[in-house]
Amino acid sequence: MRVDPATMVVQALVTGAAAGFSGAASAAVTDAYQALKQALATRLAGRPQVLEQIRVLERRPGGPTGHLVHDLVVTEAVDTQVVECAQRLLALLDPAGSRVGAGRIDLREAQGVQVGDGNTQHNTFG
């Protein structure tokens, strides 16, 4: 299973903000988080509404993120530098989980399956 780059960037933001909020962030994590935010700020110059969504996410890391993912895609803010910053942050926060191929799930022929946390799903099989 491969996560799209915008979702991965938002995941890194959420995880980094949560680590900082809990006080569990090391200096390396804090630096990597700041580098990601700076890379996004550069790419999102002139897009204050998207930057505000990042600030809201920092205050409430458990809040909804779908609009931010969408806006990062629409604004084409996720470039190679942003992805590298997000990957670096995720590797610091969860070295085992950030490996390529980690968490691979085969969902062929599956019905009514969700992957991830905090999802809501309504199924109608017929």
Image (cartoon, rainbow, N blue to C red):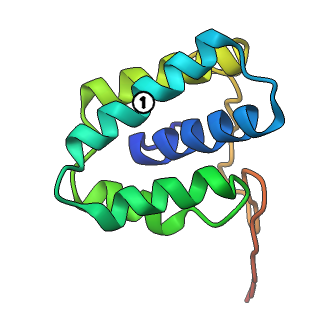
| Quarter holding residue 63 | bottom right
In this image, 113 relative to 108: left or right?
Answer: right
Image quarter hosting the C terminus:
bottom right
| Quarter holding residue 14 | top right
Q: Position of residue 27 (x, y in %)?
A: 64, 11
Q: Position of residue 116 (x, y in %)?
A: 73, 50
Q: Secondary structure at mark 1?
A: helix
Give the total of numbered labels: 1
Residue type indicated by callout 1: Leu
Q: Position of residue 114 (x, y in %)?
A: 74, 59
Image quarter hosting the N terminus:
top right
User: Crowding at label 1, few (<14), some or many (≥20) Cα neighbours within 10 Å?
Assistant: many
Residue on which the image places disc 1:
36
Q: Is residue 1 visible?
A: no
Q: Position of residue 92 (x, y in %)?
A: 64, 14
Image: 75 above or below 26? below
Residue at position x 75%, y 40% from top?
21
In this image, 61 relative to 38: left or right?
Answer: right
Residue at position x 69%, y 52% from top?
61
Residue at position x 35%, y 61% from top?
50
Considering depth in this image, is 8 or 99 the residue closer to the camera? 8
| Quarter holding residue 125 | bottom right
Image: 42 above or below 64? above
